[in-house]
Amino acid sequence: MTARTDALPTQEMTINMGPQHPSTHGVLRVILTTDGEVVTRAVPDVGYLHRGLEKIGERVTYAQFMPFTDRLDYLAAMNCNCAWAWAVEKLAKIEVPERAEYLRVIVCELNRISSHLIAFGSYTADMGAFTPFLYAIRERERVNDLFEMICGNRLTYNYARVGGVSGDAPPGFLEKTKEFLDYFEPKLDEYNNLISYNKIFVHRLANVAVIPAEEAVAYGLTGPNLRGSGVPFDLRKDEPYSVYPKFDFKVCVGTGERGKLGDCFDRYMVRINEMRESVKIVRQAVAQIPDGPVLAKVPRVFKPPVGEVYFRSECPRGETGIYLISDGSVNPYRLKIRTGSFVTMNLFEKVTRGLMIADIVAVIGSFDIILPEIDR
Amino acid sequence: MEAAALSLMNAVPLLAGVPLWAVTLLLIVAAAAVILVFALTFEGVGSLVLRKVAGDIQARIGPNRVGPNGILQFLADGVKLVLKEDIIPANADRLLFKLAPYFVFVGSFAAFVVVPFGVGLIAADLNIGIYYVMAVTSLVVIGVLLAGWASNNKWALLGGMRAAAQIVSYEIPVGMALIPAVLIAGSLSLQDIVRSQGGLLGIFGWNLFHNPFTFFSFFLYFTAAQAETNQTPFDLPEAESELVSGYNVEYSGIRFGLFFLAEFGDMFIVAALATACFLGGWNVPFFHVGTLPWIWGNLLSLGVFLAKAFTMVLIMMWVRWTLPRLRVDQLMRMSWKYLVPLTFVNLLGVSLWLLVFKGKGIPGMIASLFG
Amino acid sequence: MGLKEYMNDIVEAVVTTAKGMRITARYGVDPKEEVTLQYPEERWEIPEGYRGFLHNDVKKCTACTMCVKVCPVDCISLESVRGADKKMVLASYDINIGRCMYCGLCVEVCPPKSLKHTSGYEMASAARGELILHFIAEDAAEIKARVARQVAEAAAKAAEAAKTAEAAKTADLSAVAAKPPVVEPKAAKEEEKKPE
């Protein structure tokens, strides 16, 4: 945009977008400075959902912190549960029964599907098409039914335990999971036909907020946002944990199929394709799952050895890293959580410069941020 | 109207002593009341149907709690809107804020006057019918702009500006896409346009099938008109996911209700114009309604017209629940780079066609081939 | 932009829109696709192990306070006194379900398995106080006073028994005759505890 200097003097307008705004995915506040519809500056103002999770972690025991990890990313609580369990197990060098690891992988990947479904659905709703959102919610309900079966809750699962999982899969769970996968896989093609390749949708997303690969790496993006820029980095492959090495799956990266590499459309498509890969992983896990116990013997008063640990795992919104220092007592001495959404917000101001107001919504949606992860 | 008043005075001996102007005024008020009732009913039922269609499409049920199967939902909504507190923001421009909803509503309602509901059912068969519709519906843009400005809210202002830019831009393709129908009928009067599509050709007498250019004209008109009435995918002035609710964000109670009613009114006007100009209006295929007694002919033609118009409304709803929304610059590009040139090409095509084939359409030519 | 591209754009827009509309139309006309559950009339099947409201079977409860200790949000409060038989007697057991986050940790640690999740999930209230579930209807102070009385009684009886035993010893009576007074208060205590 080039401004005419000889025209009437114009004034920039500061608009407050959020914290109550339908498209900021929670209580994100963006301070927009606009020139008409063109945004000259968009500064994210985070912190409205700060609960001090890291401090809470220092005063509760290792087992007690598990339900709080549900609140770290409520759309992918299983992944956060498991990340915490894996971190503590790494710290205390606990051997986890194999069946428990398989169950963890199954629920993590199912949760990845349900989280990406929300990302997809709310993104299309942000773009003005409300119908795909409800289709996505419908599919997510089925995943929630599965989770309700295995752990008893639909949103805050608290399923993983230090040393395993809280309970074995009830009879019929694996069959129902397979049933869901069979039902779900064709739906992805339907989504693509319905909205992904819709001309208007593509136009809204393509070439918007392009993040080149070097920049994405430099700013520390992870997860689908990084892969959307064409960097094939996936912790499940590059730093394998749990039983992930046993499964055959592809790392989805952006291809720039409808615009420049690293635009909103690439990030969107990475999520759609990742759901397909997650389906593949769950299929393999369900087929291979061994019998056996699901919880290792962990003393009731659990005191890990003195030491520190950093464990990172691939969550739907990027890398969730858990840094723990133990002083040998029942509580962690220090806990630091690194989340994908928070890091992504660093880049927000840079990529949104010169976009339109409607694009700000597109960028927020394509980053698939979630506020509890940003504010913790 | 005066002619109707005269014939009424002749028919009813009781009115013989009443001056002509009084009877005319009475007739005008009666006609306005009938149209208002129709418009309000349509707008109410339309909102219910919209929600039901949304429910069906989105794998839900839709409203089903008020009355049997939810059919009284619109009454409940209406009562709610009327009873709600009417809030005027502290720093709003009070006069303009109050005025805006009326502009919008009047703009949409006044267009009902020239809608040809039946063979004799038209409030005023103006000889500039289409022109009149284009003119009064432009009143809506003033109302929306006022609403956006007077609310003293930045989101509302953005919505108002968007609406102004959008409606002004799309006025041109809408007008250009309607001209083929005018050319074929040789009149701006909507009744004349409808009559020109009658005859023995049945549905092939419709302007839609007159020639390839009119066929495209219909779709161009439909697209552009959706934009002019702020329907998805062109609902940028409202854009609840960007501008929260756009120009009407500060409105509540019955003032919001007027915006809401106007939206559905516009929807019907678009559908009615499409029906009248391209889909044969109230013409019953292969049948001349004029041969029936006045009352039956009118009822039949009214039914046919409403059936066609409601089908168009349903299609608009179907589109609405399928497509995402355009961005402002894309919206402008679509108007100026796609719709405007295409409508001009179409207009040129139709004019040439009429010149070359002496006003005959393809179905007409085929019919004349077979005698 | 060439003419070919221009026409392609238009065709693509029309084709993709038509594709999308075909899908929405299919959902629109197929009543089988409706997934809404008419909630108050229809309910979904609650699976086994559903984590609903907590319920404590106070008869089984040993007042071990494991649940209180493990609760991350401190929503369980428990008062107990040591009874005459040296077992803990519950004086009050309250769960603030307005604060509970249904994590289920308390249920997992409960040694006598008296604390359970029910399948209940419906509770709305205008006052926060109503969200506190009291599992013991009797007033805590009353129970405490009663138990204290019993303990005192038992102690007195025990002292008396000891005295009589002493006296018996001194009176050269047999030890068997001295036993009943010691057992008696225990049985009486047990009976009294039941209605709680």
Image (cartoon, coloured by chain):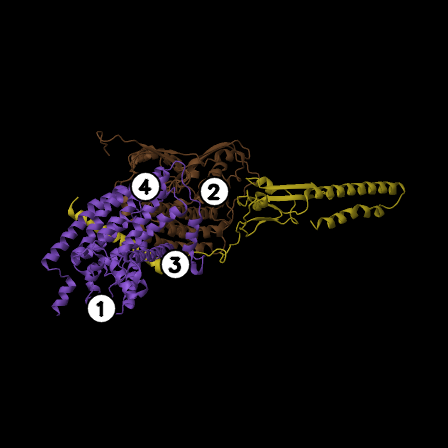
Kindly identify which chain the residue marked by label 3 belongs to. C
Q: Identify residue type, mark 2.
A: Asp
Q: Secondary structure at mark 1?
A: loop
Q: Residue at x 60, y 41 (%)?
A: C68
Q: Secondary structure at mark 2?
A: helix
Label 3 and label 4: CA atoms lie apart by 43 Å
Who comes first in sequence, dot 4 or dot 1?
4
Q: Name the residue that disc number 1 marks.
A: B286
Q: Secondary structure at mark 4?
A: helix
The answer to whether dots 3 and 4 both sit on one chain is no
Q: Secondary structure at mark 3?
A: helix
Q: Colour of chain C?
A: yellow
Q: Identify residue type, mark 3.
A: Glu
Chain shown purple: that is: B
Taking the image as shown, residue A158 lies to the left or right of residue B49, namely right
* In the foreground, C156 or B295: B295
- In this view, which residue lies farthest toward the right? C171
Residue B319: image tag: none
Residue B165: which quarter of the image? top left
Label 3 and label 1: CA atoms lie apart by 39 Å
The answer to whether dots 4 and 1 both sit on one chain is yes
How crowded pointer 3 is (Cα within 10 Å; few <14, some 14-19, many 20+) is rated as some
Residue C167: which quarter of the image? top right
Label 2 and label 3: CA atoms lie apart by 32 Å
Q: Name the residue that disc number 4 marks.
A: B146
